[in-house]
Image: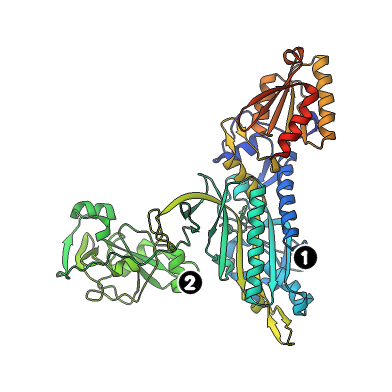
Amino acid sequence: MRTSQVLIPTLREDPVEAEIVSHRLMLRAGMIRKVAAGIYTYLPLGLRVIRKIENIIRQEMNRAGAQEILMPILSPAELWRETGRWDFYGKELLRCQDRHDRDFCFGPTHEEVITDLFRREVRSYRQLPLNCYQIQTKFRDEIRPRFGLMRGREFIMKDAYSFDRDEESARVSYQKMYDAYERIFTRCGLNFRPVEADNGMIGGSMSHEFMVLAETGEETILYEEGGTYAANVERAEVLPPTDVSTDQPLPLETVSTPGMKTVEDVCKFLSLTPDHLVKTLLYQTPDNTIVAVLVRGDHEANEIKVNRLLGTTEIILADPEIVTKVTSAPVGFAGPVGLKNIRIVADQAVQGMKNFVVGGNANDTHFLNVNCDRDFQVETFADLRQAKAGDPSPRTNAPLSSAKGIEVGHVFLLGTKYSEAMGANFLDDQGKDTMAIMGCYGIGVSRTAAASIEQNHDAKGMIWPTPIAPFHVHLLPVTNSELVQETTETLYQSLIEAEIEVLWDDRDERAGVKFNDADLIGAPYHVTIGDKGLKNGVIEIKHRRTGEMVKVAPSEATSYLSQHLASL
Ligand code: ATP
Ligand code: MG
């Protein structure tokens, strides 16, 4: 393609609204343009990358035995009411009405629609296993759309859904998708890691997220260096503590702690380390009950674990007014001693502590030498804290390391959550009506493109992995001489014949401008054709990733590039 004939509106300046590098570079390279918050148009360069990722996904899905379908973007509210998600999904679900006032939503995911298809069309175990996928635009009205394609409101997703006759077969389907995901992200040229994940709103019993490792990632991963265990920090299990105190309980004391509202303040004031303190966090459940969650002073509560224990979905920290009402003290002085009619749950680390410090439920007051059972009752001890780097791996005890990641894919074993709610049954080999076991599997196609940039760029621009690069070769003639033009034209034709994707910068621009744009766009190879070189019978090929330059005869350039591209 010739630059003059493609819409590639590159920008010299960094767009002010872009906070992360992928967003900035995609705007600067003219790959995307914003239409509204979290809603973008893909320009030719951007769309080429998206299509390449889609093709890799399509090939691997087909290879894994999944079949492509295309479901509608709009789906009727009735289906969502059957599973309860019409209410449960909240504001992220964008709703609308048709001219007959019927409720619809823009699909954020398609479990309801596919399960409806299944219950209508599948009768017998002979039709199983079944796995259908689509690559389609999704809509989620995210509270904070940001970072360009990374967290859009409208975005492209591949979603697949499997139906199996029993749990064992469902696990086989799950593993096939897991393996396909490993192949997909490997083929996209990404440095990624599958991690154990929480099932969240979608439900089910087992799940893994595929994380592209990048500093700007919103997710934290804990993993064993060189080992197999890796988990999203939301999910990572903490082993019960080994250090159980054998100290004798001392008499409870009250101490004045004027203005000491944080763990740090109290520790400094009392000359203690934070592991001698217990924090009391007051949470409000969706039905407005208050639950006190206790964690050691140097630990953080993990709300997902607390939700799981309580059987709730969305606890929030109680408002300051409520804290004051419940504890008779401002925030910072809550404690479990003397709390009336409030459920108290505690992290397992608290169970092994003796003579610790807690808030005194009165302004500027703490209690010293507090002990469970004697001074207050805990309803349940459980793993409720956030795991952190240095904690022992729940599998091997080796210390965990932490890294940042971008979630590009997610696989879930759903079980019968949707088949039960919607009656997705089939007749088994005994003629018995049986519920299908489901799995669902998503890949953020547009997010994958952005994640690749987060991982592959330098100060000058993007550095595309060849399999998803918008072009393989950028041809850069640097003068208008006849020789340069002719050589470029011949090379252009020869590259096309060799099925190498080439972008020819045929604009009447200074060499510097062309070089800058080429570095920005980040095709793997840049070919500079100039009079000086041609005088010596050579043109120059630059490897974008390494900066390595080689000089070759124009007639040899195509075979040089073919060889290098084939080796990737
Ligand atoms: P997140 O926690 O990032 O919101 P999610 O858990 O809601 O993601 P899933 O429901 O598992 O995501 O969706 C499948 C995939 O779709 C995700 O792994 C991610 O790659 C992609 N995705 C989800 N939300 C967005 C979004 N707002 N913009 C772009 N891609 C998204
Ligand atoms: Mg989400």
Residue at 73% across, 44% down: 47
Q: Is residue 106 visible?
A: no
How many marks the image carries: the answer is: 2
Q: Nearer the viewer, residue 99 or 396?
A: 396
The residue where tag 2 is placed is 312
Name which residue type carries label 1.
Arg
Q: Vertical placement of 219 versus 3: above or below? A: below
Q: Vertical placement of 326 versus 154: above or below? A: below
Name which residue type carries label 2.
Thr
Residue at 81% across, 32% down: 495
Q: Which mark is residue 27?
A: none
Front: mark 2 or 1:
2
Residue 554, picture quadrant: top right
Left or right: residue 388 versus residue 257 is: right
**In x, y percent, where is residue 531?**
75, 14
Q: Which mark is residue 99?
A: 1
Quarter of the figure with the N terminus: top right
